[in-house]
Image (cartoon, rainbow, N blue to C red):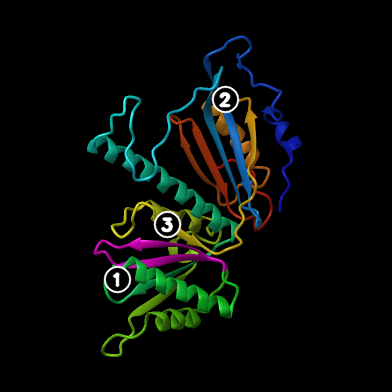
Amino acid sequence: MHEFHTDSIESSSTFVTTPQEKPQGWTDDGDRNTWQDVYTARQRIFPNGQSELTISKEKYFIGPAVLGKARAKRGERMTDDEGNVEDDEQFGSRRARNDDVASRRAKKNVRLCCKEISADRLVTLTYRENMKDRDLALKHFDGFRRRLGRCKAFHYVAVMEEQERGAIHFHIAVNGRQDYNLVRSIWQSVVGLGQKGEQMAQANVRDPHKFGFGKNGAHKLASYIAKYCGKQMDVRELNQKRYFRSKGIVLPVVNTWRISATTMLGAVQTAFSIVAEFGLEGVQTWCNNALGVVWIATAPRSGPLINTCPF
């Protein structure tokens, strides 16, 4: 586990490391009932040296807290102060927004869990028939993970995908080389044979090279499998899970602090200064000026420190 060295980072960028200090331009002294912008950095360091850093522009209201309206329970309609119930269009629009928020949250959790277990292989479990029964498919998956867990330690992050024809199959992120024959035989034994004695299930195991990620691309597998959580599925109801994971996966603590940057350019420069402390090998970047967000992720360090900005 790498330690966070603030001294070396602060030599190239100015940070606010304590709540008492304020960034330049912070004018809340006596200026009540106003909004202030501040850039906040959040970083996770994973056991194998991978890191993720997000710097985002956030608004803080200087003044008394504003109490929000009571939220309706999931699946129920909201009512206003006068007792009017929202109509079908409002209810559908709010439900769509909530579903989008849940999708983005699930994608983030899948990506982080994959990195925590150092996932570098993708196991795909498929059916020969057009499987559309979600409950039965989950029963098969539960039997698969239980039997495989008796043979070896099995840490996993799994998502269910529905193909265009409606067929369900599973993508499972795991760490290390897998016994393909064992994985396939267990999955086939769980699903069983067809009426003519044919195998009704198949399994596939791929490493990052098969996806074109290269030798330093294992961490990109986390983003690849996370995208399936955002897909709409006819077989998934509102309250049903988007992903599944083994027990004992504990995500790293988030290091959070405010930085003194006042522009997106300054935020990006600061972000690379922080991440360079751990190396820029296999770096992934995403930046949105409109949202005021920059995100950087790095691969596990496999050689000498590479801390040169790629652009």
Residue underneath mark 2: 38
Nearer-the-camera pick, 4 or 238: 238
Instruction: Measure the C-alpha gap from mark 3 to mark 1.
Output: 18 Å
Q: List x then y, in percent, for residue 137.
A: 37, 70
Residue underneath mark 1: 131
Query: Looking at the image, is 135 positioned above or below residue 111?
Result: below
Range of the magenta residues? 155-175
Give the label, 1 or 2, closer to the camera. Answer: 1
Instruction: Measure the C-alpha gap from mark 1 to mark 2.
Output: 50 Å
Q: List x then y, in percent, for residue 65.
A: 54, 22
Q: Residues within 10 Å of mark 3 (few under 14, many from 20)?
A: few
Q: List x then y, in percent, for residue 58.
A: 52, 28
Answer whether residue 163 is magenta in the image.
Answer: yes
Q: Residues within 10 Å of mark 1 (few under 14, many from 20)?
A: some
Give the label, 3 or 2, closer to the camera. Answer: 3
**Residue type beneath disc 2:** Val
Numbered mark located on residue 90 in the image: none
Q: What residue appears at the point 45 percent right and 50 percent down from the top-left corner?
A: 106
Answer whether residue 271 is magenta in the image.
Answer: no
Q: What residue appears at the point 32 percent right and 53 percent down from the top-left corner?
A: 232
Q: Residue furthest top?
A: 30
Numbered mark located on residue 241 in the image: 3
Q: What residue appears at the point 64 percent right and 21 percent down from the top-left corner?
A: 23
**Residue type beneath disc 3:** Lys
